[in-house]
Amino acid sequence: MAEVINMPRLSDTMEEGTLAKWFKKVGDSVNEGDILAEIETDKATMEFESFHEGELLYIGIKEGETAPVDSIIAIIGKKGENISSLINVSESKSKKEPEPVKEPEPVKVPETLNTPNLQKEETKSTNALKGSGSKVLISPLANKLAIERGVDLSQVKGTGDNGRIVKRDIENYKPATFVNTNNMIIATEESSYDLPNSTMRKSIAKRLSESKFTAPHYYLTVEFEMDNMISFREQYINTQNIKISYNDIIAKAVALSLVKNPKVNSRWHDNKIEISEHVHLGVAVAVEDGLVVPVIQFASSKDMSQINTEVKDFAERAKNKKLTPAEIEGSTFTISNLGMFGIESFTSIINQPNSAILSIGSIIEKPIVRDGEVVVGNTMKLTLACDHRAVDGATGSSFLKTLKEYIENPVSILI
């Protein structure tokens, strides 16, 4: 009997997935354990393997398309098996609203228009497809309007089905003039383009909006002296022959501070506050589509070189969307560092269900007062964002006080 393959829920927050790549095509044999496809979730791109054997009889979603969780993506069964009823049932479940009214069927516009009248119009308007060797999908009405207005179709982005150019695209089209200045293309007239929201970007928008508007945020900003840490890092690298970053040292210091201040390492629930005795430290990593937060599990028990190795590995695989769900879930606290971009200080939105997140700025050389004298020193600003439902001001302040002791006296991290 044929088996319907639905869009799987590959993470706890996933509501839809994008089919990044098919490894099988209709008619191919499939064995249990074969990789069917790559699916892009709200957090990563993961391989999806088959739990069934047979022939791939049907593909319900093309590469690059997005579908809700549990919608049909494929059917596997015996060769020649009738699957029309399965397709009809699955498609009827996925329909949520009637089909929109469609414009007349599109026509293909060839490189050279052959009718005498159209050739005459093209001479007047200099149709953009001439000599391009390409064809454009366009509705008859839009094509007529484009010829009348002399619109360069190669510069028009279609918003109809399958990228078809429709009437509104021609009516809204504005030719842009560009100037090349020092290898930069600068528009001298109004010009813009649309960047479709990826599954990850939509998930980020939803989750951060929920966090910002459901958790009452407040912020505690501190400034720590960094001269001792700068010296500590240099000595550590020279003596251990292991290169670590300031972020690695801070991550370890944060983990130890959470052990001493467990109420900050918590989650809010309607009927309780869940306090974690273990520290699963989330580290925000920027990727092309936004932000992912891989998790250093049991961070307080790991040394700085181990943290360094894990963070590097996470960052590399995050860029290629190769992180697994287990690696990006379960954090109890999160750090976000923009210091490498020269950002002096900033505030972050809490990565729920955590109760707090620490924003780390850059190290700044400036005059400071030490022992009653003004001297040149290095400082760093950190801002702790807290969910006031779970973490009171005094609790957050106590955490930062502990963190200050570790950062300004980093040798204590090793003790």
Image (cartoon, rainbow, N blue to C red):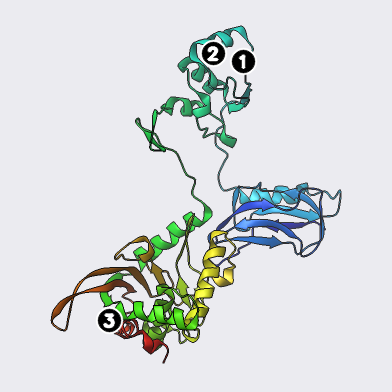
Determine the secondary structure under disc 2: helix
User: Where is mark 2, residue-wise?
Assistant: 122
**Horizontal and vertical percent position of residue 177:** 39, 28
Amino acid type, callout 3: Ser
Q: Categorize mark 1 by other alpha carbons within 10 Å: few (<14), some (14-19), many (20+).
A: some
**Residue at coordinates 49% horizontally, 55% vertically from top-left?**
288
Q: Which mark is residue 397?
A: 3
**Residue at coordinates 86% horizontally, 51% vertically from top-left?**
79
Compared across the picture, whether 91 is left or right of 229 comes to right
How far apart marks 1 and 2 lie (CA) works out to: 8 Å
Sequence-first disc among 1 and 2: 1
Of the 4 image quadrants, the one containing the C terminus is bottom left
**Residue at coordinates 58% horizontally, 19% vertically from top-left?**
130
Sequence-first disc among 1 and 3: 1
* Relative height, residue 283 to residue 67 (above, below): below
* Relative height, residue 118 to residue 318 (above, below): above
* Relative height, residue 131 to residue 50 (above, below): above
How far apart marks 1 and 3 lie (CA) works out to: 74 Å
Callout 1 touching callout 2 (CB < 8 Å): yes
Amino acid type, callout 1: Leu
Determine the secondary structure under disc 3: helix
Q: Quadrant of residue 254?
A: bottom left
**Horizontal and vertical percent position of residue 169:** 48, 29
Along the viewing direction, whichever of 28 and 177 lies nearer the viewer:
177
Compared across the picture, whether 48 is left or right of 156 comes to right
Q: Categorize mark 3 by other alpha carbons within 10 Å: few (<14), some (14-19), many (20+).
A: some
Along the viewing direction, whichever of 409 and 291 lies nearer the viewer:
409
Of the 4 image quadrants, the one containing the N terminus is bottom right
Sequence-first disc among 2 and 3: 2
User: Where is mark 1, residue-wise?
Assistant: 113
